[in-house]
Structures are given as structure tokens and as C-alpha cells.
Amino acid sequence: MKTSTEIWSSASVVGEEKAVELVAKAGFDAWDFSMFEMARIDWSTWTLLDKPHALNGNDYVKFAKTLRKIGEDNGIYCNQSHAPFPSLVPGMKTFLKRAIECTAIAGGEICIIHPDNNQNAEQNAEFYMELLPFAKEHGVKIATENMWNWKKDAPTACSAACSHHDDFVKHIKTVNDPYFVACLDIGHAEMAGLDTTAPTMIKALGSALQALHIHDNDKLGDSHQIPFSMKIDWNSVAKALKETNYKGHLTLEADRYVASTGASDEQSTLKALKDLHNAVTRLDDLIKNS
């Protein structure tokens, strides 16, 4: 399978342009366009922050084109993106549309847009269906993702939009559009308290599953660490992907790994990315041999 990884963690050290280049040098086939800096929020007031970045300025089209060219010049492409979140913060819809547009400009086929954690399938469907005509105009699919909330006064997660496989499937079926697909966050699916597993999710979603966020955890917290470093059973994940004939990319979202290595420059960031590439290649081998 083709491999990919998010660029946000590397960009935090070396900037987006160099991050795309280093992802290519590390051996990946593609890059996942992280757009969190497009619209950062103040979590205490639930409002958008005025934090300047190329993605929220007037030159966002030029910036997306530049990243695409850097990737192509280095032999890789954009396979998917991640829009800023939370999706229902006042004023965010403008940036969600911009994220879809930037995905198309960069050459990506899928834009992951979070559901509202605390809304049901019908409510979230209304939100997504407002965005789908714009996404179709740009030839980009929208992927929803399995989320989680924290259980009050307990160290475990509790239900949220798409956190259980039945609710995830319900979200997909309620929208019922070929441009609306699933991105399974494997780490989220393995958090205690959600009454599901990543293999169960994979099998339930079937052909609707067209994107992944791959990372490891201790089955309690949302660790976003490198695969094979913590407690997720990757043999079972690989077997489920093989059995369901998953055809998408193997995209890493182990965005805390680069920082955890102490990467502080181009060389150390490249080393961390090579570690990540080795891990996702190991998963690919498990899938092939399942």
C-alpha cells in the first residue's frame, strides 16, 4: 500500500515547505496536508484566534500550490488533508471551505473534517450536507472521523460522534453520498470506554473506509505515538484491513512522535520521519502477510 504522514509535527520544527521535502526524503509516497494553523481557536472562549499564517492570509492559494510543487519536485503527492477544528466554532465554516479548496489545489482527494462531538448522526449530516456541494465542485471527498469525549471524574474516554462502530456507520448512511466517506482514527478506536476496537470499526465500515489516521497508544489516552511502541494490537488491525480489502493509503497521524524525539532541526526531524516510515512499512508488511 502507499504510505503517507501528516506534516504538522515536522512543520512545527522546519516549516511546511521543508516538511514536505523531508517526508519525501524519509521514503513516504505521499503527504497529508495538515491545516490546523489555518484557524486556531481559543478553547476558553470558543472563538477563533487572530494568528497570522499563510493559510489564513490572502496568499493561501499560492501557498498550497507551492507545497504541491515541492512534493512533485521530490517525487511525492498529497493524498489527503486535515481541516482545522472544532468544526462548529463560529466563523469556522469559511475555513472548512478553504481547507477543501486547498486540498484540491494541493492534489489531495480527501479532506478530513471532524463531526461535532456532541451531535447525533442527523445533526452532523445537516452540517456535512451544507459542505458537500462545494466539495464536489472541487473534486474532493469529505471524510468524517471517529471522535471521543472524556468521562467526568474518570481516566477513560466516553461516547462522542462516530466513537462507536454503529454510530460511525449511521453517520455514513445518513448522509448517503459517494463524496462522504470514513477516516478511521485507529488510536481513538482503541481508547478504553468506547466499547469498540479498530478491527471492529474496519469491518463495520467496509468500503466506506477510505482513509486512516494511524498511531499508537496505551489504550487509555490519545497518545498519537509511533506504531508498535505502545499497546495496540497491530496484527489484528492488519488482518482486518486485509480481510476488508482496504484500498486507501496508510497515513500516519503519530504527530507527537517528532517532538518526543527532541527533534530541533532538519537532520533530527528527518531521522524521526525515517523512524515513522519504518513503522508504517512494518504495518504494510503485516497486512501483506496476514
Image (cartoon, rainbow, N blue to C red):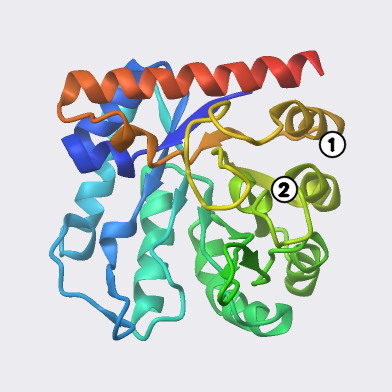
Residue in view at x 46 percent, y 80 percent = 88
Number of other residues with Cα within 10 Å of mark 2, as a class: few under 14, some 14 to 19, many 20 or more: many
Task: Name the side, left or right, on which 59 lies relative to 24.
Answer: left
Residue denoted by label 1: 244
Image quadrant where one finds the N terminus: top right
Helix, strand or loop at disc 1? loop
Given residues 186 and 52, the one toward you in this image is 186
Quadrant of the rendered image containing residue 217? top right
Does the rendering let one see residue 223? Answer: yes
Q: Mark 1: few, some, or many residues within 10 Å (few <14, many ≥20)?
A: some
Q: Nearer the viewer, residue 226 or 139?
A: 226
Q: In this view, which residue lies farthest toward the front? A: 153
Decide which of tag 1 and tag 2 comes sooner along the chain. 2
Dots 1, 2 in contact, CB < 8 A: yes
- Residue toward you, 177 or 233: 233
- Where residue 82 appears, as percent x and y from the top left, is 44, 54
Which residue is labeled 2 in the image? 209
Residue drawn at the location 67% of the way across and 45% of the way down? 210
Query: How many discs mark residues in the rendered view?
Result: 2
Quarter of image, res 118: bottom right
Q: Give amino acid for label 1.
A: Thr
Left or right: 259 with respect to 77?
left
Disc 1 from disc 2: Cα separation: 9 Å
Give the residue at x 52% y 56%: 112
Say if 218 sits above or below 195 in the image.
above
Where does the image place residue 287, in percent across and percent down from the top left?
74, 22
Q: Residue flagged by tag 2: what amino acid is it?
A: Leu
Residue at 15% over, 74% down: 50
- Name the quarter where the C terminus is drawn: top right
Q: Is residue 21 above or below residue 190?
A: above
